[in-house]
Amino acid sequence: EPEVTQTPSHQVTQMGQEVILRCVPISNHLYFYWYRQILGQKVEFLVSFYNNEISEKSEIFDDQFSVERPDGSNFTLKIRSTKLEDSAMYFCASTIAGQTYEQYFGPGTRLTVT
Amino acid sequence: SQQGEEDPQALSIQEGENATMNCSYKTSINNLQWYRQNSGRGLVHLILIRSNEREKHSGRLRVTLDTSKKSSSLLITASRAADTASYFCAPVGSARQLTFGSGTQLTVLP
């Protein structure tokens, strides 16, 4: 069964450094998402991406964040200058169409900012 | 907000028993989705029920939806230790993103 993959599984970085989290959505899916989950807290929406542009974003997704689909398979989340509070699990998800279909989540990348 | 609120917050049952979780929401919806999350792992989609459906089954899962009461329930029959996880409902309206609540933490004791 097709699945969403994410790399790396765990990323440790120092405060102020840039990180890029990578995701490979399911191949025929058209909508892509990033969510994050701070330890012990709810899963929070960050951004959705369709047709090579951001379609929706949350208040969390400020100028420090950016997303890109550099080729036909990868979907990336970049954090330009990491802060301690960016430490969280970051989940990528994709869906074949819009909100009428289920989302498929990747296993997540655990980001630790020291 | 299209966030759902799950109830109870925690549920502990014996293997073989049924588990029922409830979800309430506030906005009109297109569909409502249930997800499971094992500790520290990604979310797994369980079942989607559309606003014009009242009940849906998938294996040991049964979901009901009452749009007049803005509520849904998830029943897991004959539970197994492997069902131990957090369960979330996600009511979906006009926004494409999912908004998750705190979930129901289900513990199935062997």
Image: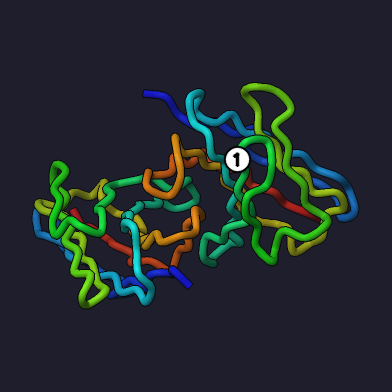
Depicted B37 relative to depicted A83: above or below: above
- Which residue is painted at 50% across and 39% down in the image? A94
Q: Position of residue B3 (x, y in %)?
A: 43, 69
The one of A10 and A42 positioned closer to us in this rendering: A42
Residue A5 appears at what percent x and percent y? 54, 30
Q: Say few, some or many: other residues with alpha carbon within 10 Å of mark 1 (under 14 / 14 to 19 / 20 or more).
A: some
* Residue A66 image point, x, y percent: 77, 47
Most foreground residue, B61 or A73: A73
Residue visible at 54% across and 67% down?
A: A41
Q: Which residue is mark 1?
A: A50
Image coordinates of residue B44 in percent, x first then y, are 38, 45
**Res. B2 in view:** yes
Residue that appears at 71% across and 42% down: A77
Q: Quadrant of residue A37?
A: bottom right
**SS of the residue under disc 1:** strand
Work out whether B110 lies above or below A84.
Answer: above
Q: Residue at x 43, y 49 (%)?
A: A99
